[in-house]
Amino acid sequence: MAELSDTITFLGTAGARFVVIRQFLASGGAWLNLGNTQILFDPGPGSLVKVAKRRFDARKLDAIILSHKHLDHSGDINVMIEAMTDGGTKKGGTVFAAGDALDQDPVILSYLRSYPQSIQVLTEGGCYKVNDVFFKTPVRHKHPVETYGFIFQTLRHTFSWITDTRYFDDLAHRYEGDLLVINVLRLNPGAPLAHLCLPEAKSIIERLRPKVAILTHFGMTMWRARPWELARKLSEETGISIIAARDGMKFDLAQLD
Ligand SMILES: [Zn+2]
């Protein structure tokens, strides 16, 4: 039997409105292939198209995880629930979402909610399981809607994903792992304050010192400044391997071993 691997494929690297609505970068979220467990993370607009284009089989999904309900993360959540359940004909898979994605101004349609095996509500300090993959939502982020970041633990690796948030002092030490994925929307400090900027991401990475950090979810100022060049400079400054995600990039966590 082939050795099991953990990979993250970035179906999109766009963050926030302008990069998304003009599709300078794709906004499909990420496909996590963790051993035999398939998870779709934050299926933003175009996720369905990217999943099909990259020849992933949505019917094999075990779960869809939504960090929060903003459109750039949730645009394709409904169609991906339909895809995961083969048009609602095969009950299966689990959807994980914050409570306000389900009740208040919900983004998940009522008529689809019976399609998955279950819908689980994310809460601060929560611990969840999909097959042999565990994940935690250590702290509620500071963001206009209910938002969580994640620490994933597979049988082989631990990695964290810091999703959208305003910077706060307690943030960094909540997220350990060999790999840190971090949403970096802005190049410089300033508005919109609900998101991390590059200097904040740098200080978080320096505090956590993962083996590798991956920057993603780029807004216009990051995109214009060439994320891959910023990542190279940051690597030199910190001595930590930092890379910028690219649309379609597949990262194999075996690189961390
Ligand atoms: Zn957001």
Image (cartoon, rainbow, N blue to C red):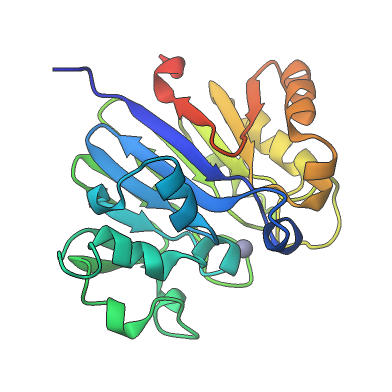
Question: Where residue 210 appears, x then y in whole percent?
Answer: 54, 26
Looking at the rendering, in which quadrant would you find the N terminus?
top left
Q: Is residue 50 visible?
A: yes
Q: Residue at x 42, y 66 (%)?
A: 77
Question: Where residue 118 appears, x then y in whole percent?
Answer: 21, 67
Q: Quadrant of ligand 1?
A: bottom right
**Could you tell whether 95 is left or right of 115 in the image?**
right
Question: Where residue 162 appears, x then y in whole percent?
Answer: 55, 47
Q: Which of 153 and 71 is in front in this view?
A: 71
Q: Which of 13 and 130 is in front in this view?
A: 13
**Could you tell whether 37 is left or right of 1 in the image?**
right
In the rendered image, the vertical position of residue 194 relative to residue 36, given as above or below: below
Q: Can residue 175 be seen in this view?
A: no
Q: Which of 146 and 102 is in front in this view?
A: 102
In the rendered image, the vertical position of residue 34 relative to residue 45, given as above or below: above
In the rendered image, the vertical position of residue 50 relative to residue 227, given as above or below: below
Looking at the rendering, in which quadrant would you find the C terminus?
top left
Q: Which residue is drawn at 52% across and 40% down?
A: 10
Marks counted in the figure total 0
Q: Residue at x 67, y 54 (%)?
A: 15
Determine the image quadrant of residue 78: bottom left
Determine the image quadrant of residue 33: top left
Question: Where residue 103 appears, x then y in whole percent?
Answer: 41, 84
Q: Residue at x 86, y 47 (%)?
A: 188
